[in-house]
Amino acid sequence: MEKIKIKEDFIKLDSLLKFADMASTGGHAKIMIQNGEVLVNGEVCTQRGKKIKKGDTVKTEEKEIIVE
């Protein structure tokens, strides 16, 4: 599991996917989320703007990260 550090209190899920190189573009992130390909803390998340906070885990088929 890879660790990703954020400076703010939270980051939106679609932005995090781009920031962590889990999605190549914002459009790609949107499609991944809409298709149910992203797990947040072990549950499928279909909310693009979901606030991801420190301690949350985000997983796709290819990569898993924890936000610090």
Image (cartoon, rainbow, N blue to C red):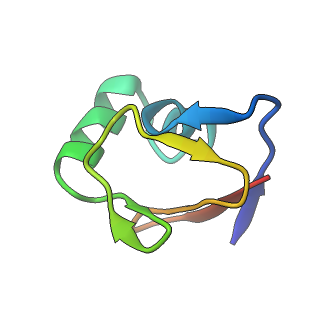
**Residue 49: x %, y % from top left:** 39, 31
**Residue 68: x %, y % from top left:** 80, 52
Query: What residue appears at the point 56 percent right and 45 percent down from the top-left corner?
Result: 52
Look at the picture and state if 56 lies above or below 8. Answer: below
- Along the horizontal axis of the image, is 3 left or right of 27? right
- Along the horizontal axis of the image, is 25 left or right of 68? left
**Residue 1: x %, y % from top left:** 69, 72
- Along the horizontal axis of the image, is 2 left or right of 57? right
Quarter of the view holding residue 27: top left
Look at the picture and state if 31 lies above or below 66. Answer: above
Specify the farthest residue to the left: 35
Quarter of the view holding residue 20: top right
5 and 60: which is toward the camera: 5
**Residue 45: x %, y % from top left:** 31, 55
What count of labels does the image hold?
Answer: 0
Query: What residue appears at the point 43 percent right and 34 percent down from the top-left corner?
Result: 14
55 and 39: which is toward the camera: 55
Look at the picture and state if 54 lies above or below 13. Answer: below
Query: What residue appears at the point 25 percent right and 48 percent down from the top-left corner?
Result: 46
Query: What residue appears at the point 22 percent right and 39 percent down from the top-left corner?
Result: 31
Look at the picture and state if 61 lies above or below 6. Answer: below
